Amino acid sequence: QVQLVESGGGLVQAGGSLRLSCAASGRTFSSSCMGWFRQAPGKEREFVAGIRWNSRTTYPADSVKGRFIISRDNAKNTMYLQMNSLKPEDTAVYSCAAGGTLYSDCSRHISYDYWGQGTQVTVSS
């Protein structure tokens, strides 16, 4: 089992920045993929960015490329999402996830077995 807890969400003006954290505990070594997803009211869950737990390979979605940076600190069992140049359309509940194998596609939600509760990010115009 893997437990995931997000933090760092909040209210920010357009153009601002936020950094989300995802603290992982349990059998984290069993998951190859770590990722961030978001879901806005009335919309489907959307992939934001993923990272391999045992390498520095990252997979940002086109919608956030150049604005969001995903990273992880293995010593702290923590993953981060640095969000810059935020837009109102980035408003959503952001959730972190873990799972998959070396052969999994880290950009697909079906690759993930464990999910956090989510943290709200609201960007005002």
Image: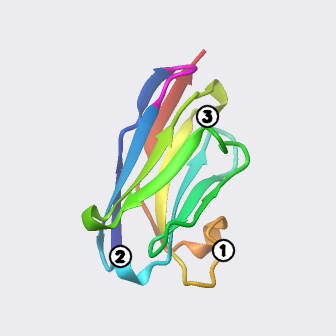
Residue visible at 26% across and 62% down in the picture? 76
Report x, y in % for residue 77.
30, 65
Q: Look at label 1 and name its amino acid.
A: Asp
Residue visible at 63% across and 79% down in the picture? 104
* Residue identifier under label 1: 105
Image depth: mark 3 or mark 1 in front:
1
What's the magenta region?
A: 13-17
In the drawing, what numbered circle is on residue 114? none
41 to the left or right of 93: right
Q: Quadrant of the C terminus?
A: top right
Q: Quadrant of the N terminus?
A: bottom left
* Residue identifier under label 3: 90
Say above or below: 79 vs 31.
above
Which is nearer the N-term, disc 2 or disc 1? Answer: 2
Residue 16 inside the magenta-drawn segment: yes
67 to the left or right of 19: right
Q: CA distance from mark 2 to mark 1?
A: 18 Å
Say above or below: 54 vs 58.
below
